[in-house]
Amino acid sequence: MQGGLEDTICAIATPVGEGGIGIVRLSGPQALLVASQVVRLRSGLPLSSVLSHTLHLADLVIPAMDNQRNLRLGHKEEPVSGLLDEALVVYMKGPRSFTAEDVVEIQSHGGALVLGMVCKVCLESGARMAEPGEFTKRAFLNGRLDLTQAEAVLDTIRATSSVGLNIAQRQLRGDLGREVEQARSSLLMVLAHVEAGIDFVDEDIAFLQRDELLRIVSEAFGVVQKLEATAQEGRILREGARVVILGRPNVGKSSLLNRLLREERAIVTAIPGTTRDVIEESIDLDGVRIRLIDTAGVRQTVDIVEQEGIKRTRAAQDEADLLLLVLDVSALLTSDDRDLLRMVRDRRHVVLLNKADLAGTVEPDAALAGHPVYPISAKTGLGIETVKLALRAQLVSGGFEAAESVTVTNVRHRDALRRAGESLGQALESVQSGMAGELVSIDVRAAADALGEITGAITTDEILGRIFSEFCIGK
Ligand SMILES: Nc1nc2c(ncn2[C@@H]2O[C@H](COP(=O)(O)OP(=O)(O)OP(=O)(O)O)[C@@H](O)[C@H]2O)c(=O)[nH]1
Ligand SMILES: [Mg+2]
């Protein structure tokens, strides 16, 4: 992404296609001037005279200059009337705007042609097309958002569950950034002292500093560890949890999927080996998104298609956040069931005793001891609501629901936290074993830098490029 902040950038900010309203957004020093080319206020006043943050009715026109050029270029089949649409136009004077620059938003009807023409006039009037994520990148470069907040813009747009959205919003408000920045600034303070201490080797001062140093570094270490610990749950909340339904053939896995989805998504038959492929669908469990994956029943088979299905079952099982092992409680446990029970023991899992509507009494079996077990009937719906609660409780602790909690959902943040944690762990060891200040300061510096990467206090073009290239044009 090149192009300096002195450019005025332009893009269609709403999705492509038909819409009631579509918005063209301009940002940069020339925003007003460029917009003036296409906007004629109904009030007759020049656009430059309007108050910031007020909405104005306007006609959108192709300026005469362009008409003339059209004629010059020989496009005369259709005489251009010059009128594109009517619109509402708002000017937001920097720094009180999303990018902290002068911004104009032109809200016309959401037709691809209208929006394209408005953009075209803007581009011909001195703006340039915005790169993906460039509006948000400018908000970052102009200091209006830190990097965690810029990333939260994307998380908000992409949120698929109410909890994911809630976390993105807290991050957008700066909760994560603030906590990380506080830890970082205390480390920078430590660094300043240690580095000063290296110059003035006075025993007494050095000793006092060591206690204080230990306290501050441990505190930062605690914050980093606390944040890092939220990351696994954070990923689940952001992307949804992968829950894989497992079991030998015919126990009712596909029936369970259908029951949880409340639709007949997967084929159910009385013939073992019905499901051959991996089927994935999403459900929302009270704000937490679950990606439910139905699989082919596991057994020894000579059928090549079924063998391939079972291979896919194994692959899905390896990547699962939670395994839902289904057993048929109307039949005795088979050796396949027992193998599966052993396999899930070390994983996050729930055991479902399906077909409870058929069974007289559930036979207690030693193989089930120690497993979280729920009797259900995929057929009648018995026990399904309890299973949903159990699933959600197994996947997320609920700690994120506290208003003041900060949850890390981003892999980039988690990696930086892990590096910061490792460095701080080493720094603590060095302090405790009485190492020289120089050694301590190397680790503290590394930790502070890793934390700085999270908020963007320290960045490279490469990091910024990677983050903002994920955005679409217009964000
Ligand atoms: N009575 C009763 N029958 C059920 C229940 N759940 C499933 N079944 C029946 O069990 C048979 C197999 O169900 P499926 O859902 O296809 O089983 P599956 O585990 O997906 O089987 P495969 O895809 O072959 O591995 C069907 O005839 C279902 O109607 C239940 O809770 N009670
Ligand atoms: Mg099936």
Image: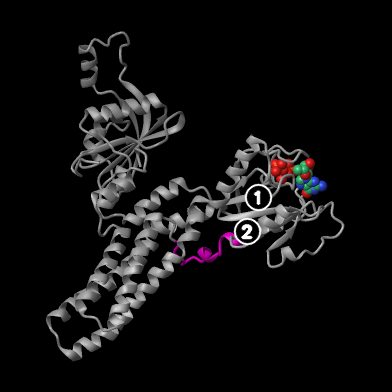
Q: Is residue 399 magenta?
A: yes
Instruction: Say whether marks 2 and 1 touch (CB < 8 Å).
Output: yes
248 w.r.t. 344: above or below: above
Which residue is most to the bottom?
204
Badge 2 or badge 1: first in the primary sequence:
1
Residue receiving disc 2: 344
Q: Tell me where residue 471 sits by quadrant.
A: top left
x and y, in percent, of residue 145 in the image: 31, 55
Residue receiving disc 1: 246
Looking at the image, which is closer to me, 45 or 228? 228
On-image quarter of the C terminus? top left
299 w.r.t. 349: above or below: above
Q: Is residue 259 visible?
A: no
Q: Secondary structure at mark 2?
A: helix
x and y, in percent, of residue 413 in the image: 37, 58
Q: Is residue 229 magenta?
A: no
Q: Secondary structure at mark 1?
A: strand
